[in-house]
Image (spheres, rainbow, N blue to C red):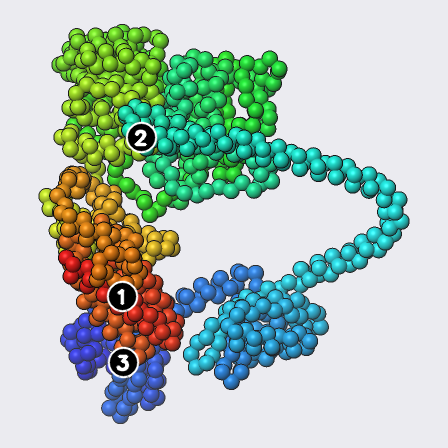
Amino acid sequence: FDGYFRQVNPQWTETLGYAVEELIAKPFIEFVHPEDRESTMVASQNLTKGEPVRFFENRYICKDGTFKWLIWNATSDVETRRVFAVAHDISDRRKTEAELESVSDRIDNVAKHLPGVIYQFLRTKDGAYSFPYISESCRAIFGHERHEIEKDSNLAFYRLHPDDLKAMLPAIEHSFETLTTFKFETRIISSTGSVKWVRATSSPESIDDGKTLWNGLMMDITDIKTADDKIKQLNDDLAQRVSILAAVNQELEILTHKLELAYDEALEASKLKSEFVANISHEVRTPISAVLGMTELLMDTPLSGEQDSFVKIVNESAQSLLTIINDILDFSKMEAGRLELEVIDLNVRSLVEGCADWLASSARRKRLALMTYSDPSIPQFVKGDPVRLRQVLLNLASNAIKFTETGEIIVKATKFRETEERVVILFQVSDTGIGLSEAARKRLFQPFAQADGSTTRKYGGTGLGLSISKRLVEMMGGEIGVTSEEKKGSTFWFTVPLERERWLAQPDLRAEQVQVLEPFDVMVIDHSTSSRNILCAYLENAGIRPHGAATPGDALHIISEMKEKDGHFTVTIVDASGDTFDGFTLAKQIAQLHTQTAGRVIIIGAYDEKERMEDAVKAGITACLVKPLRRAHLLEVVLKPNFGGQEILSMPEGEDSDIETVLMNLSQSGSELVHTTDGGANRLHVLLAEDNPVLQQLAERQLRKFGFDVIVVGNGKEAVANIESVDVGYFAAVFMDCQMPGMDGYEATAAIRNLEVKGKRRVPIIAMTAGAMPSDRERCIQSGMDDYLSKPVGHEQLKRVIAAWIPQIYDRLKDADEQANAPKAVTQAQLDNTKEFEVGSSKEATTADAPEYEVPIKIGDLQKLYGKEDLEDILRMFLAEATELLGTLEEQIEAHQDRELAATAHQMKGLSAVLCANDLTRLSLEIEQAAKRSAWEPASSTLLLLSEEFAKVRTFVNSYLNKE
């Protein structure tokens, strides 16, 4: 009883971390947590009196400073003054209890602040009812505490109005039998006799032992019912008043008859208007349709590059014009609010530059300079309605051209603000035209309104364009406006919020993510401040040092200063499209007199100056560009040191002419470009996580063809272990199957991202799954993956993803493309065999031993997807693996192994998707879904269909392999 340990077992020393000598050297109370010492001393005093201690809990301090929760059972021998005690470590239990208590507190807190009662209602298989859980707010409705109702459900039922209770019990049983949502309104009678109306809504689910559990919400709707009663009373009063007014109605019959006649006349006029609009619609659409059709036919004929560019612009302009005319003719639909918007992928820069291309000829006819600028910080991929955005931009830009006689038009897109989900883009169209008075600005966006409404007005138009643009912008969630000063030009602007394209996020091919290794100097000579700033901004964003000059004098002065410093310009750009100075003469002088200092000379001119451009090229000018200028063409000419001799770049070829293509070309030209993404070793490593052996071999072959060293693992746990065991940056990417045994792809991704938080650099993770629904893609991105490939994965799909996420592989991709496009010798036997097994082959096959049924898989497509040699190996592996999986499916159905069956069916689904065997894929999916529902009869019947379909595939594949 002296308070010291006399004897302890090894487990006690191991639990606390002290040596025996340390434990027996101090009173035991010093090892007890300070907060528990008082209660411990009380228990100790009881032991000295001979009273036993049972299930006493306290905390002991460990040697490392932590503490352990212990539960004690102890007795004492008063004569020998000794205590005998046994302790059990319950630290884990106490931790779990604390976590559960925290969760329970959160749930109670949510329930406490919700406007209603949250409850769980249970029915046993013998029909007994109870409330396993009900929130504290039940007191306000039933007049009983929560624990009282949880203990006795009758306390709640007794409060129900007897008539409502009779109706409610059958409703509960109906919900139980059909597992449909329970909805019921009832009256609750309080202890004081007052009545409350409540509405209960709950969803049932079957749980163990034939029990059914409803999770629901009960709301007090007394105020709603009271309001309904008042409305009913008001309706009764109204009916009474109506009867009083009946006599008045009789007097109004004559007037009503006259109104009916007027209505009929208005209806007829409306009908004639509709017929007129329909006729006009037809008359306008017909010639435009002819233009579209003829240009499409023309594009199929041999054309020069310039002619092809013209035809494409005519075709695209006609399409845009048709869209605008449709909107104008359907103005009544906009009035009624029935116009719908699309939400699809779009590229802001391509949209802005494309609009300028379509309006370029109009600007050139008036000798106006047309330039565009797209802020490089705008995400490359966003989602919105490109047709409506283009319509608004075209309307504003065409108006700018119409009302401008001299000067320039600038079309800009900049980032206004952004969130994680959206980015708001500010579009601006600035001109140097006639400007607007304050009075004109106020009525500008009204239907049929024009700045000049007189009969002698100089500019034509319906006055609907800006009104339609305003409505479209507002429908897209944005704002539109104008800043202008009379005779000094105008800037029309509008903002539009656009969704970020999440699954295509972070492309590393954008120009703003490309830098030169060694910055160099470029001079830009342009009389227009706006145009000069745009050119300098594009160059500076690529890591180049631009030097702007507004006049030839400024330019020659800058060149002289650079020469005095023994420096030089790598490129000199001269804008020759203005009237301030003769840019062509200036460019030739610079090219001839200052070759070493000025470097390569590039002219930006107008399209109607083609002859002068050709003369300039002959005189030593490196290249001539044409306004409106695409950023891709500018960077291509500036960054490429040996720009294919002297050359004229005329009209862009449309939205496909993009910076990505330029950069792929530059990577072959030897220019000193580097991507901001860190490079890797000569042979890049990728990690492939896939549990199916056939799909493993297929994916490994495909990746090795791109020059990768592929590490293959069979589940998510192995993938995480590989990432954890290598140095930072060892793997260029991870290709992750989503459904794998043990740890699936989603869990593995989360674990890898957790490692990266702890210091590992982020590695791109690309999902490879048989799921093809948008929800599958969304789940992959939300789990932390960067991109998504739907099986079967073809060469082009894989190349797109590799190009986006592994920029070090650019050169190899280009070489692979060149090899793939090289002509190959093909024998007549190969041609015959391909014809027999190509896409769409069926019963009409002429070979004698061709299969006499619909072709289950399309050999022609698969040869394009995987290559002929690989396809033969894939088919053999498929037959072996699928045969084994079919046997496994049968065994699992017989044993009613639902989880195992779902996993095997998922494997069969992925395997079938590799061959684009749609029927096999569909039937495998049906078995997988049946397994998740434990629906054994549908699973068994579907397996028979699957076996029959596989037999067809096997016969067809064997026939193909034997012919090879």
Judging by the rendered image, the residue that carries numbered circle 2 is: 301
Identify the residue at the far bottom of this view.
79
Q: Residues within 10 Å of mark 1 (few under 14, many from 20)?
A: some
Q: Can you tell which of label 1 and label 3 is closer to the viewer?
A: 1
Tell me the amino acid under the disc marked 2.
Answer: Thr
Can residue 212 be seen in the rendering of this structure?
Answer: yes
Q: Return the disc, 2 or 3, that comes first in the chain's sequence.
A: 3
Q: Quadrant of residue 855?
A: bottom left
Quadrant of the image containing the C terminus: bottom left
Cα distance, mark 1 to mark 3? 69 Å
Judging by the rendered image, the residue that carries numbered circle 1 is: 952
Cα distance, mark 1 to mark 2? 44 Å
Q: Quadrant of residue 362?
A: top left
- In the image, taking residue 792 as reference, residue 253 lies left or right, namely right
Q: Which mark is residue 87?
A: 3
Cα distance, mark 2 to mark 3? 93 Å
